[in-house]
Every structure is written in structure tokens, then in C-alpha cells.
Image (tube, rainbow, N blue to C red):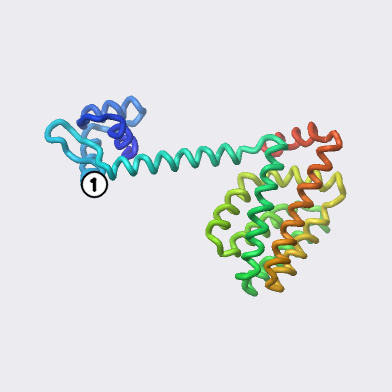
């Protein structure tokens, strides 16, 4: 409600009283009393976001305008990010893998410089679980995803961690199903844990160049597998799989 009040005050150049603001909130779907509006306005006054204009009502302050602007920009960014992560075409899957290759390669390089023995043991356990799933014929994609997420987190770079959490968001887990279909058709299901093993070896050696190269090669292979599969008149089938996986 506070943001709705501030937004309304930011849209006008004259004082607005509690009664008018109450009507505005009611029209916007807020179930709130005029007395509650008055109490919130007092809180906004105390915070320096609004100021009294005598008996005429409230005006928004410069600090209030800055807050409204910042919150609107944040909402716009969130909406833009949501659109970017709403992946529904094979072309968008390619775009995501390209983005992952850039971010995760740099994250692997940084991780090689920061990784601890305990973190190495954690990655080894994930790799072992992934291989066990493949041997039993069960779904090991979550192990693979967590491996990638942990590498970005271990990087210690706040920007890479944030970017990694975005491009490896759990809302995109369904895309792994598309890559699994590609791997099954191409007989390359065993290659991902082998790639992860090379990444792990480079991290254990604390070799940034090798870690970056191993991660880049891994994601480049995934990209190439997807390109080759799509080029074999399989794009319509992949699109159907994507729709099913997306739910």
C-alpha cells in the first residue's frame, strides 16, 4: 500500500489528502480504511518520503520520488528477466547455452583459485551420484545441475554468482529434459559426467586456465550436440519436447 500511495503522489503536482488517496486505493482494489491511509501517511512523513502541505494534504519529497523511481526500475528489471527466462523455442535454448558458456567458463576459472578441499569433495560426490544414476538408468540430471550451480557459487565472484543463479535457475530445470533427449538420440549420455570429471581435475589442480577450458569445452559440446540434432530435421520434434517439458 505504501508504494501505491507514493506512486500516486509522484503522478500529481498538487497536494493529495487522505480521503482522495483512500478513494484511489479503493479503485485500485485495496480493501483499506481512510484511517489506515492516514496512519500510513504519518509513517511516510516520518520516513521523509512525504511532507504535509498544510491542510491541503501531502506532497511527495525528492527522497520519495527517488524511491518510486528505483522501485519501478526494479519491477521493470524483474519483468524483463521473467520474459528472458520464459524459454519456449529451440532458438532460445541456444541463446541460453551460449550465455551459460560465457558465465560458467569464467566461474570455473575463478573457482579454481578459491576452491577448498571440502568443496572438491562435494563436487566429487555429485559426480559419483550422477554416474550411479546413469548406471542404474535413473534420472541424474539434478546432480549435473547442482554440480554446475556449485561451481558458480564457489567462484567467489558476486556478479558471477548472481548471473549463475539466473541462468541456472530451477525454473529452467525442464530444459535439461531437452538436452537429455538429444543425448539419448546421439548416444552421448555418458559424456557429461566425463566432462565434469575433467572440470573437477582442473579444479583440484587449482589450474584456472584448464578449468575455464574444460567448462567451455563441455558447454560447447552440448551446443554442438543440439545444433547437430536440430540440423537433422529434428527441430519440430525438439520443439514438441520443449513444450511438454515446460508443462
Residue at image coords 83%, 37%: 231
Residue 237 lies, in percent from the top left, at 80, 34
Image quadrant where one finds the N terminus: top left
Of residues 62 and 196, which is closer to you in this image? Answer: 62
Q: Residue furthest front?
A: 209
Query: In the picture provided, is 171 more to the left or to the right than 20?
Result: right
Residue, disc 1: 48
Residue at image coords 22%, 36%: 59
Q: Quadrant of residue 41?
A: top left
Query: In the picture provided, is 194 more to the left or to the right than 105?
Result: right
Query: In the picture provided, is 24 more to the left or to the right than 78?
Result: left
Residue 166 lies, in percent from the top left, at 58, 49
**Up-down: is 51 above or below 188?**
above
| Mark 1 neighbour density, 10 Å: few (under 14) some (14–19) many (20 or more) | some
Residue at image coords 87%, 49%: 187
Q: Quadrant of residue 12?
A: top left
Residue 43 lies, in percent from the top left, at 23, 45
**Up-down: is 113 above or below 229?**
below
**Up-down: is 20 above or below 169?**
above
Of residues 1 and 7, which is closer to you in this image? Answer: 7
Q: How many marks?
A: 1
Residue at image coords 84%, 52%: 188
Of residues 134 and 235, which is closer to you in this image? Answer: 235
Image quadrant where one finds the C terminus: top right
Residue 26 lies, in percent from the top left, at 31, 27
Amino acid at each position: 500500500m505504501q508504494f501505491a500511495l507514493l506512486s500516486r503522489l509522484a503522478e500529481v503536482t498538487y497536494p493529495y489528502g487522505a480521503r482522495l488517496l483512500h478513494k484511489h486505493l479503493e479503485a485500485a482494489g485495496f480493501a483499506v480504511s481512510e484511517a489506515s491511509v492516514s496512519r500510513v501517511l504519518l509513517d511516510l512523513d516520518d520516513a521523509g518520503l512525504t511532507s504535509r502541505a498544510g491542510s491541503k494534504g501531502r506532497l511527495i519529497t525528492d527522497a520519495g520520488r527517488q524511491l518510486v523511481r528505483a522501485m519501478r526500475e526494479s519491477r521493470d528489471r524483474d519483468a524483463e528477466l521473467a520474459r528472458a527466462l520464459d524459454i519456449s523455442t529451440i532458438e532460445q535454448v541456444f541463446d541460453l547455452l551460449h550465455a551459460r558458456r560465457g558465465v560458467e567458463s569464467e566461474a570455473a576459472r575463478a573457482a579454481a583459485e578459491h576452491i577448498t578441499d571440502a568443496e572438491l569433495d562435494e563436487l566429487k560426490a555429485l559426480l559419483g551420484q550422477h554416474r550411479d544414476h546413469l548406471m542404474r538408468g535413473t534420472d541424474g540430471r539434478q546432480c549435473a545441475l547442482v554440480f554446475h550451480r556449485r561451481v558458480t557459487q564457489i567462484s567467489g565472484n558476486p556478479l558471477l554468482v548472481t548471473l549463475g543463479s539466473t541462468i541456472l535457475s530451477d525454473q529452467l530445470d525442464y530444459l535439461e529434459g531437452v538436452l537429455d533427449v538429444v543425448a539419448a538420440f546421439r548416444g552421448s549420455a555418458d559424456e557429461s559426467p566425463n566432462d565434469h570429471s575433467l572440470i573437477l581435475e582442473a579444479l583440484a589442480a587449482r589450474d584456472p586456465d584448464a578449468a575455464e577450458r574444460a567448462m567451455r569445452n563441455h558447454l560447447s559440446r552440448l551446443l554442438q550436440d543440439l545444433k547437430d540434432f536440430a540440423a537433422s530435421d529434428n527441430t519440430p520434434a525438439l520443439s514438441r519436447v520443449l513444450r511438454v517439458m515446460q508443462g
